[in-house]
Every structure is written in C-alpha cells, then in structure tokens.
Image: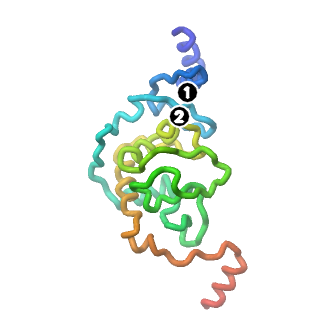
Amino acid sequence: STVTSLIEARFGPRAIAMWFSRRGQLPVVKCEDMGSSTIGGGAARSADAFEDVAADFSLPAGSIKKGEKYFKKYCSQCHSIYPDNRLSRGGQTTLGPTLFNIYGRASGMEEIGNKMGTERVEGVLWIDGPLMNYMKNPRVMAQAGIQMNFRGIPDFQIRCDIVHYLKTLDWDNEEISNPPEKPSSLAPVRWMQKMREQ
C-alpha cells in the first residue's frame, strides 16, 4: 500500500516490520533486511529468511579447525566451551550459556551469566538447521528481541565450519570436558596459590 511504501522509503524495511507487528501482522522479510539492533529487533515470520537451510537440511562437509578459529572470532567473547561455563582457563565467566554439549540440547537448558537478560530462545532443539539459522540472524530465528549483541554470520560455509566444531564440544573431548580446576574469583586467593606453586 501507499502507507507502507512511504514508511519503507523514509525509515527502511525494519520500520515496516515494526509497523506491521504492532498491528498483529508480520510481513515477509529477508533476515538480512532486519539488521542487528540490540533493542527489540523487529521479528518477522518469513519463509524466505533462511532459504539456504531447507527443512530437511543435512550439514555439508566442513572444517573443524576452521570452525574453531571462527568460533573464537564470533562466539567466544560471550560463550564458553567448558562444562562449568568458564570463558578461559583463567576462569572468567561469560554472559551467554556454555556451548559445551550444545548439539542436541534443548534451548534454555543452561544458565546464563547475564542475569538481567530475560529474553531467551525457547522451544528449539539445537541441531544442524537451527544452529545454522541462529548464527545467520538470531533475532529472526528466535522471533524475539534477544539480549545478544551479534549481527549474525551471512556466510554459509563459515556457519557450517562452526557447527562442525560445536559437534566436538562434548564429553568425548577429554581436553574440554575435564579442564583444570577453576581458579578462585578472589585475586588474593589466586596470588597465594601462585606463591605456593613457586
């Protein structure tokens, strides 16, 4: 209609989605058009949003080594790979849930460090297709204004590589499933432990 054309011309496709969502209707919008706003984010129901991942999606070949590199680049700032949700061997905690044993887990099962974040993905089984779609655009996949400051990864192969790496983060991976004891969060205690080791 003329009104929607005017809104889109003046404010862009996200404004259209927000305008329709306030009226109980959601237009078909590609996920790339939704942007990466961390406040609200216009959710859109769209068959076209994730056209590169079909309903019967089977994960193509990928590189675990590259996936680990991409994980460090895109995910490790907020997500741990360890069962106790530490970010590093130094023991820092994270904002998001641990991605240890993520493959095959239901969404919302793990604790998050950001206790103020109330918006979480619900009703998703984290397997190939949902992981690929979530990494492409979390807000559209979740249909909510989630608390993650993450634009998404449009490159299909990078997402494939990360999923291959995520599949290795399970109890069969001895190095990750049995990390050294988590250090104390109190600096004086850590200093005393270091002095005793020397």
The answer to whether residue 75 is left or right of residue 113 is left
Numbered tag placed on residue 35 in the rendering: 2
Quadrant of the rendered image containing residue 94: bottom right
Residue at 48% across, 22% down: 27
Q: Amino acid at mark 1?
A: Arg
The answer to whether residue 38 is left or right of residue 63 is right
| Contact? badges 2 and 1 (CB < 8 Å) | yes
Instruction: In the rendered view, tell whether residue 22 sits above or below residue 36.
Output: above
Residue at 43% across, 61% down: 101
Of 86 and 103, which appears nearest the observer?
103
Residue at 61% across, 23% down: 22
Element on which disc 2 rests: loop
Residue hosting label 1: 14
Whether residue 68 appears in this view of the structure is: yes
Q: Position of residue 18 (x, y in %)?
A: 58, 25
Element on which disc 1 rests: helix
Instruction: In the rendered view, tell whether residue 133 sits above or below residue 99.
Output: above
Tell me the distance, in whole angstroms, between the alpha carbons under discs 2 and 1.
7 Å
The answer to whether residue 149 is left or right of residue 187 is left
